[in-house]
Image: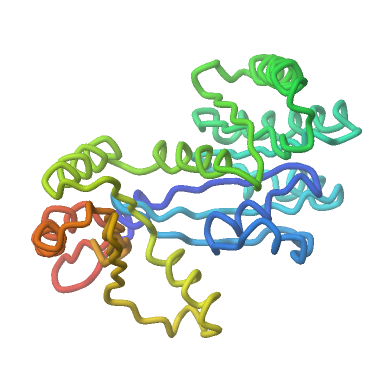
């Protein structure tokens, strides 16, 4: 059982220099902060650990690594093997507005050198962040230049091109969600199977849109808007009905909720709710909760 637990955990490093926006994006993605609220967040001290459950037998073990120089030096020296061993994904965040681009690149080079030493097969997602601060007519050129510099550094340190992905991001639009979606898609076992099952379910329901969300994120959202503790939040189903569309959100698996947007037809809406309940059995075997011998292996 311990072996099964270790296989399901995927270690993800979130790194970048202090002020790059790492903790802000983590709070937006996993704690449902909105962009205007992240200004209140303080700097990360050393490493903050988060465990997030997903479908596909995945426990994401996220290490948000503080970017202050003293912490980075510690990661690269006395904590080197501890931090960089058994890494599935490195997410490295560059602040595109930084006035110290060369220092940023040197820090990245030192980071992936340690990664190459202890986790040479890991995937690297490079997020070129705060793109909203770049004038629109200059974004393509500046992004291409920064991407080329970072790619060359990766190749110099022994990583091949297929191990690296680049995403331009901002907390003020959907680009941040698109980037993190690709990270999760890469990590989730059987992601293609899950996606195909959701497509078939959408066709069966005649849904305009399906949204799969992590239960923990949904609880944080409800707690934020109700002033309660996330651990105390209990949720069964929510419905919205208008003349143009109907919407409901309900549990799909132990760790996920599903939101369904339907045409404004009462009979189709009720049938969709029943079909989601029936579909739960098909999705449950992909979830992280696998009961063996009466005990839950996580």
Q: Which of 247 and 9 is in front in this view?
A: 247
When the figure is inspected, residue 85 is found, relative to residue 263, above or below; the finding is above
Question: Most extreme residue toward the right, as rendered?
Answer: 99
Q: Can residue 291 be seen in this view?
A: yes
Image-quadrant location for residue 24 = bottom right
What colouring does the structure picture have? rainbow
Q: Position of residue 213 (x, y in %)?
A: 37, 57
| Quadrant showing the N terminus | bottom left
Q: Is residue 1 visible?
A: no
Going by the image, does 157 lie left or right of 228? Answer: right
User: Above or below — where is 114 with respect to 176?
Assistant: above
Horizontally, residue 32 falls left or right of residue 108, namely left
Name the residue rendered at 60%, 54% in the picture.
26
14 vs 4, nearest the viewer: 14
Q: Which of 191 and 32 is in front in this view?
A: 32
Which residue is found at the position 28% from the left and 70% from the top?
Answer: 239
Q: How far across and how far down the image is residue 53, in percent?
A: 39, 59
Q: How many labels does the image show?
A: 0
Where does residue 190 sit, x and y in percent of width and height? 26, 39
Q: 260 left or right of 92?
A: left
**In this picture, is 220 found above or below 50?**
below
Q: Which quadrant would residue 117 be assigned to in this image?
A: top right
Image quarter hosting the C terminus: bottom left
Place of residue 3 in the rendered image (x, y in percent of width and height, measured from the top left): 32, 54
Residue 215 vs residue 162, the one in the foreground: 215
Q: Write the residue at 24% across / 69% down.
A: 296
Residue name at image x 31 percent, y 62 percent? 257
């Amino acid at each position: 059982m311990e072996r099964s637990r270790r296989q399901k955990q995927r270690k993800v490093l979130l790194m970048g220099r202090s002020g790059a926006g790492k903790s802000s994006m983590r709070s937006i993605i996993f704690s449902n902060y909105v962009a205007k609220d992240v200004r209140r967040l303080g700097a990360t001290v050393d490493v903050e650990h988060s465990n997030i459950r997903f479908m596909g037998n995945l426990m994401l073990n996220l290490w948000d690594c503080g970017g202050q120089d003293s912490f980075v030096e510690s990661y690269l020296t006395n904590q080197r093997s501890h931090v960089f061993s058994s890494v599935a994904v490195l997410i490295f965040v560059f602040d595109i507005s930084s006035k110290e681009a060369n220092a940023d690149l040197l820090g990245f080079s030192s980071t992936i050198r340690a990664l190459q030493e202890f986790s040479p097969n890991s995937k690297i997602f490079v997020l070129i962040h705060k793109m909203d601060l770049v004038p629109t007519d200059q974004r393509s050129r500046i992004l291409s230049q920064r991407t080329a510099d970072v790619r060359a550094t990766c190749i110099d340190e022994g990583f091949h091109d297929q191990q690296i992905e680049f995403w331009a991001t901002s907390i003020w639009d959907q680009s941040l969600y698109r980037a993190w979606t690709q990270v999760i898609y890469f990590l989730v076992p059987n992601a293609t199977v899950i996606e195909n099952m959701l497509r078939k379910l959408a066709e069966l329901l005649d849904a305009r849109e399906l949204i799969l969300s992590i239960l923990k994120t949904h609880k944080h959202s409800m707690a934020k808007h109700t002033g309660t503790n996330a651990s105390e939040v209990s949720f069964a189903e929510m419905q919205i009905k208008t003349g143009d569309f109907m919407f409901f959100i309900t549990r799909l698996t132990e760790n996920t909720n599903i939101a369904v947007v339907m045409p404004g037809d009462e009979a189709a809406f009720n049938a969709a709710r029943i079909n989601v309940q029936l579909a739960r059995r098909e999705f449950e075997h992909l979830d992280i909760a696998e009961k063996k011998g009466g005990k839950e292996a996580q």
